[in-house]
Amino acid sequence: MDQRADISQVRNRIDAIDNTILELLKERLECAKSIGKLKNETKRAKWDPQRELEIYQRLREHNQEIFPDKALHAIFHEIITTCRLSQRKAIVAYLGPEATFTHQAGVKYFGQSAAYRPLESIVEVFQEVEKERVQYGIVPVENSIEGAVTSCLDSFLNYNVQICGELQLPITHNLVCRSGNIEDIKTVASHAQGLAQCREWLAKNMPGTPTLPVFSTGAAAEMAAEDPEIGAIASSLAVTTYDLQVVVKGIEDYQGNTTRFLVLGKKSPQKSGADKTSVLLGLINRPGALNEILTILSAKNIDLAKIESRPTKGKQWKYLFFLDMIGHMDDPVIHEACNILKQICAYFEWLGSYPRADNIDFNGS
């Protein structure tokens, strides 16, 4: 009897805490709306990435590892994005249909409060952002195993958008179908990269079963939901979205499979203190041109995070280079280096400066 009374007392205390949390959340939302109005009056950007990083850092220090850090980040990420979006609800375009890894990445970055618009191709995402029919787009740019997503890189040549952010999403591929029985699967559908990332598992466990490349993992899941003989390689989000059964979890050939996504918009955010700057370069056709670029960056102690080459359409043996540098365009050293690159390159385009993915999440959450 005393034990039941003790449990009841603790539960009453939990209820009281929950009520207090709710009231504070409502108050926080009103404060965010007030800040939004003040920013409108002063024409300041709605999103302040440095402020958000400071909040996460302060919370983690104050927490002292008592509440699990990953869960703490997930909770406050949803709170912060909800409050920010109360100032202006974001519409986010992504490679659809629902439950693609790109959709999953969008929810991780913007939270549940944003409005999501599925599109049929990466090119369409760029188009919607350029024409300002959506505030943001999210697209995959590279995978740790299969490399660059070339259609994304090529789209930067054709559309006037800027990179506003990035995130890295660990990719876990599940074999799914309506029944949950591998014997029922006559064809395995997925995006070409999904099929490639599970090539060895399929050859070993489903030899002779034909594969069907489609434009997204979400589309494959949708097909599996409609046809009991189709299995899909898809995300965990697809299982609940399309009411499918998991046949085998985690069929990717290599652990540590991660995809990097870019957040697109019309204007890059202000400096956060932990940023990355992306540029697109066309080199003058002379010996040592690329080495000259790298020497300039090295002399200024600029850390080059990535370099990727793409052939110039219609010009045989000519290439454009995508460079990611650590730092923000507002950093004097990055600004100076880019001014030099503008002068010595045949083509130069600043694609954006944005918070680095490894500084958005703590502990990889």
Image (tube, grey):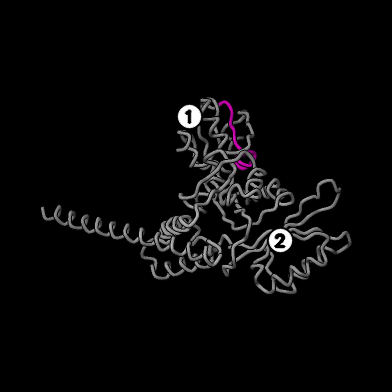
Instruction: Return the x and y of residue 166 as percentages of the image width and height.
Output: 59, 56
Q: Is residue 112 above or below residue 249?
A: below
The residue identified by callout 2 is 350
Residue furthest front in the image: 41
The label number, if any, that marks residue 178 in the structure image: 1
Q: Which amino acid does label 2 sit on?
A: Trp
Tell which of 149 and 157 is nearer to you: 157
N-terminal-most mark, 1 or 2: 1
Q: Where in the figure is residue 239, as x and y percent of width and height?
A: 47, 37
Structural crowding at the residue carrying mark 1, measured as other residues with C-alpha within 10 Å and reported as few (<14), some (14–19) or many (≥20): many
Q: What element carries label 1?
A: loop
Real-space Cα separation, disc 1 to disc 2, in angstroms = 46 Å
Task: Please name the residue shown 59% across and 58% down the image.
Answer: 165
Disc 1 and disc 2 in contact, CB within 8 angstroms: no
User: Where does the image place residue 172, in percent across and percent down from the top left?
Assistant: 53, 45
Q: Does the magenta stretch include residue 189?
A: yes
Tell me if mark 2 has few (under 14), some (14-19) or many (20+) residues whose alpha carbon lies within 10 angstroms of its own.
some
Task: Tell me where residue 80 appears, x and y as whole percent.
Answer: 45, 59
Q: In this view of the protein, which residue sits in the foreground, 72 or 170?
A: 72
**Of helix, strand and loop, which one carries label 2?**
strand
Nearer to me, 156 or 72: 156
Residue type of the residue flagged with mark 1: Arg
Q: Which of marks 1 and 2 is in front?
A: 2
Q: Which residue is drawn at 74% across and 59% down?
A: 349
Query: Looking at the image, can residue 203 be seen?
Result: yes
Magenta stretch: give its range: 186-200
* Count of labels in the image: 2
236 within the magenta span: no
Residue shown at 42% from the left, 70% from the top: 61
Q: In this view of the protein, can residue 258 be seen by the observer?
A: no
